[in-house]
Image (tube, rainbow, N blue to C red):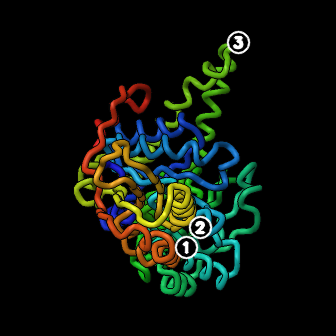
Amino acid sequence: MPLVNMKDMLQHAYDHGYAVGAFDLVSLDFLEGILAAAERARAPVILSLAESHFDYYDFELLMPAVEVAARRASVPVAIHLDHGASLDSAVHAIRLGCNGVMVDASHTDFSDNVRTTRAVVEMARACGTPVEGELGYVPGVEGEDAERHPGELACTTLAEARAYVERTGVDFLAVSIGTVHGRMKGKPKLDYQRLKQINDALSMPLVIHGGSGLSDDQFRRLITNGVAKINYYTALADAAAASIRGRARADRANGYTGLVKDVREAVSSEVETRMRLWGSAGRAAEVLSRCRSWLPVEHLIIYNVEGIDDTRLEMMMAEGRRVLGAIPGVREVVTGRAVQENAKYQCTWLVRFCHPAVIDSYCRHPDHVAFADRLFRPVAGDRISIDFRIVETVFSVHHHGAAGGAGQGG
């Protein structure tokens, strides 16, 4: 249950005048530290995975851990793809479990940004997944962020913001009003008047990228003017690095585990401080009661075949796994054969959808229609199908570590 619809989460924050932190994670230490802070603060949280950080971890390996951690939490959690590079990136992220996506085309001209974002919105809408767009450009100023986000600051204009939201249909808008990715050089000058005009015109949750380095008062003024999601990474990375350097100074004989021993708590402390400042602390129960849960749908077909032998049956199943597994919103395709020879039905498909919206978009998708009409239905007239949601999942594990006691499943 605690994995919830991100659009509901951010709309609640926008309506009630606070911001949810979207904390980029790059390891299990970051994941556990972020969630431990959310549990202590009783705050909603967004676990953010930036494609610009995929050099540091295998996205496909880390995502199962992120999803399990989210589902066993007792606070509302969303999982977000940050700075995706393409439409394919968004499709892949949704397949792996993200329930919010952002494909960053802000470095392109306005028409290209609209075209790219609109394609992502159309795909994601069919998957029930909200989309964040970015208009204007937030550059990096130092270190890795300068390399990953090159170029000059380009502020969001009111006229383009209106046109962009209307033409793309995004659910949230990331705006550029003076923040930067990475460490701030001096005190940033934020254009609150520009932000207020955009907020007054759009009345939708706004997003700030480059949250590290802002003052408490700057954060409060951003939230007052419609910012409901704040992206935050550099300060977490700096806190983690400081803890490692401290362990190294304290004992030069420390091995890897000794050096990273305090990373989870360092990250957690910084996250909790931000949650309390941004007003999300203490909101967990209220948000849970107002948000739709995010649970996959299982599409099950049991069937018998006529007119084909086992070789052709296996070929048909393999083709189905390949074709159907590539449809946006499909998380997994499993084929099987009955264990008992005398079972009433001998074959099965289990297709896992990320969201109920995929039931309709999957059925209408041309690849599904072609496969079903050409290969499946002609030989599988005797079949039963059902779409169902898993009501409860029990995690039979002992919680421990920084995120221990996070919840009891469900």
Camera-nearest residue between 11 and 129: 129
Q: CA distance from mark 1 to mark 3?
A: 50 Å
Marker disc for residue 235? none
Q: CA distance from mark 2 to mark 1?
A: 7 Å
Q: Which residue is mark 3?
A: 253
Relative to 283, 307 lies left or right: right
Q: Residue 394: x percent and y percent?
A: 29, 38
Q: Do residues under tags 2 and 1 come within 8 Å of each other at their CB atoms? A: yes
Mark 1 or mark 3, whichever is nearer to me: 1
Q: Which residue is mark 2?
A: 103
The secondary structure type at the circle numbered 1 is: helix
Q: Which residue is mark 1?
A: 120
Q: Residues within 10 Å of mark 1 (few under 14, many from 20)?
A: many
Relative to 65, 253 lies left or right: right
Camera-nearest residue between 271 and 75: 75
Mark 2 or mark 1, whichever is nearer to me: 1
Relative to 279, 195 lies left or right: right
Query: Looking at the picture, which amino acid does disc 2 mark?
Result: Val
Query: Looking at the picture, which amino acid does disc 1 mark?
Result: Val
Q: In which quadrant is the C terminus drawn?
A: top left
Residue located at (40% from left, 25% from top): 400
Q: Compared to 265, does 151 lie above or below?
A: below
Mark 2 or mark 3, whichever is nearer to me: 2
Q: Residue 95: x percent and y percent?
A: 51, 58
Q: Give the mark nearest the N terminus, 1 or 3.
A: 1
Q: Residue 242: x percent and y percent?
A: 63, 31
Q: Compared to 404, does 183 lie above or below?
A: below
Residue located at (35% from left, 60% from top): 303
Q: CA distance from mark 2 to mark 3?
A: 44 Å
Residue located at (55% from left, 26% from top): 262
Camera-nearest residue between 261 and 377: 377
The secondary structure type at the circle numbered 2 is: strand
